[in-house]
Amino acid sequence: MPARDYDAIVVGASFGGLAVARELQGEVLLLDRNEVGSVQTSACGTPLWVPEALGVSDSVLQVHDRLVIRTPTRTVRYDLSAVPFCTFDYRAFCEGLLAQCRVRFLRTSVSGIQDGAVVTGAGRFTAPVIVDCSGWRRALVGGAGAEPARRHHSFGLETHTSLQDEGLTFLLDRRLIPQGLGWIFPVGHGSLVGLGSYAGRSKLKPALDRLLRDHGMAAGSYHGTYFPNRPLRSTVGRVFAVGPRAARVQVLLDRDGAAGVLVERSRVPGVVSGQVSSQAAGAEDLVLKYVPERSDVVVGDVVVTSGIDRIYPKGLVVGRVRFVGKGSGLFRDIRVEPSARFDRLEEVLVVRLAREPLDTPRSVE
C-alpha cells in the first residue's frame, strides 16, 4: 500500500498523544493499537484544575482536599483545600480530549519507521512532523518489540475495590514493597488500590492481595503497566538568556556552571561542573565535586540530577563515572563522562519548571 501524506502523525492515544493532537492543526493522523480510553494506563489522580482547564470536567469522579501519607510509624496529613485534587474516569477523560481534536483516528499496530514512513498494520503513512507518544513501548524511537529497562521504568498494578473513603492516601512501607509505594484513591463508588515499584518489578499481585486482605477488601479486575520514571535523553544545560528568536544555553561543560547531582546507585550527593583545563580522564569530562573520600562511588556509576539546585528537575541523566581517584584534600577526584554528545547536538528539549510548594502538614501522628 503506498504511503499517504499528513501534516502530522501522533502515535499513542493516551494522555500524551491526545494532548499533542489537541494542539495540532491541518491533517493529523492519530494512531493507537487500542480504542481511545479502553486500556487504563494511570491511577487517574490529578489537581482539579487540570480537567477543568482541558474542558473534561465531566470525567471527575471525586474531589479531594486531603492527602494522607502512612508509614509503619506515623501518619502525616496535608491540607489540599487551596489546590484540591481529584480522581477521574480514564475513558471519559480520554474521549473528552479526543472530541476536541481535529484528527483522523486509526486503530492499528505500529511497527516502526522505514524510509521516513510510519509503518502500521493498515499501511505506511508519512508526515513532516511525527510524534511518538506510545509510552514505554517507544513504538517509533525504540523499534518494534522494545522491552522496558528496569532502571528507566517503574511498574504499577491496581484494582478497584468497594472501599468508600475521603482523601488520597499513599502507603510507604518497605515491608509491603521495597523501592516503591502503595496508594488508595477513592473514585466516588469505591476506591482504586494499587502498588508501584520504582525498580520495575512487575510481579506485584501477591503483595497487592496481601494489602487488600489486611484492609478487609476484595479485589475487582486488575490492570497494570510500565511507565518511565525519568527522561531517557541526556541533560545538556540550562537556558539563561532568551530573545525573540533565540536563546543562550549554559551547557554542563561550562566551568562556571554547576548542577546538583546524585550517584544513582548509592545516592551519594555532589555537584558537577566543567573543567578548567583538559585532564587525563578526558577533555570533555565533568568534575564531580564535594564527594568525601570514604563515599561509595565506583567507575561506571550513573549520575543523575538531584533537584536540590532548583534549576534541573530531579532524575535527569547527566553521565557515568569514568575516573575515581584520591583528591588533594577532603574530597575525592571524580570525573564523569557526559551522556550527551555535545559535539553532535542538533536539537534539545526545553523543560519548563512551574512548581508550587506543598503546604506544610496539618497534623502528624
Image (spheres, rainbow, N blue to C red):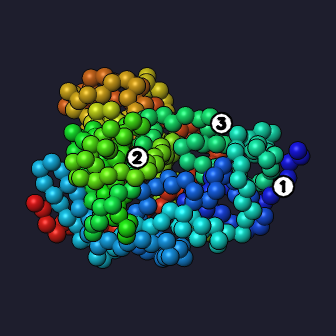
Query: Which amino acid does the dot numbered 2 rest on?
Result: Leu
Q: Which residue is mark 1?
A: 5
Q: Is residue 42 visible?
A: yes
Say whether marks 2 and 3 touch (CB < 8 Å). no
Q: Which residue is mark 2?
A: 157
At numbered mark 1, what does the secondary structure look like: helix, strand or loop? strand
C-alpha separation, residue under disc 2 versus residue under disc 3? 25 Å
Q: Is residue 329 visible?
A: no
Dot 1 or dot 3: first in sequence order is: 1
Image coordinates of residue 277 in percent, x first then y, are 44, 33
Dot 2 or dot 3: first in sequence order is: 3
C-alpha separation, residue under disc 1 versus residue under disc 2? 39 Å
At numbered mark 2, what does the secondary structure look like: helix, strand or loop? strand
| Mark seen at residue 279 | none
Q: Residue furthest right?
A: 2
Quadrant of res 38: bottom right
- Residue at 35% x, 57% y: name it: 161
The quadrant of the rendering that contains the N terminus is top right
Image coordinates of residue 165 in percent, x first then y, are 27, 66
Q: Is residue 236 above or below residue 330?
A: below
At numbered mark 3, what does the secondary structure look like: helix, strand or loop? loop
| Mark seen at residue 143 | 3
Image coordinates of residue 130 in percent, x first then y, are 71, 52
Q: Is residue 291 above or below residue 221?
A: above
Q: Is residue 116 above or below residue 53?
A: above
Query: Which amino acid does the dot numbered 1 rest on?
Result: Asp
Query: Which amino acid does the dot numbered 3 rest on?
Result: Gly
The quadrant of the rendering that contains the C terminus is bottom left
Q: Is residue 62 left or right of residue 68?
A: right
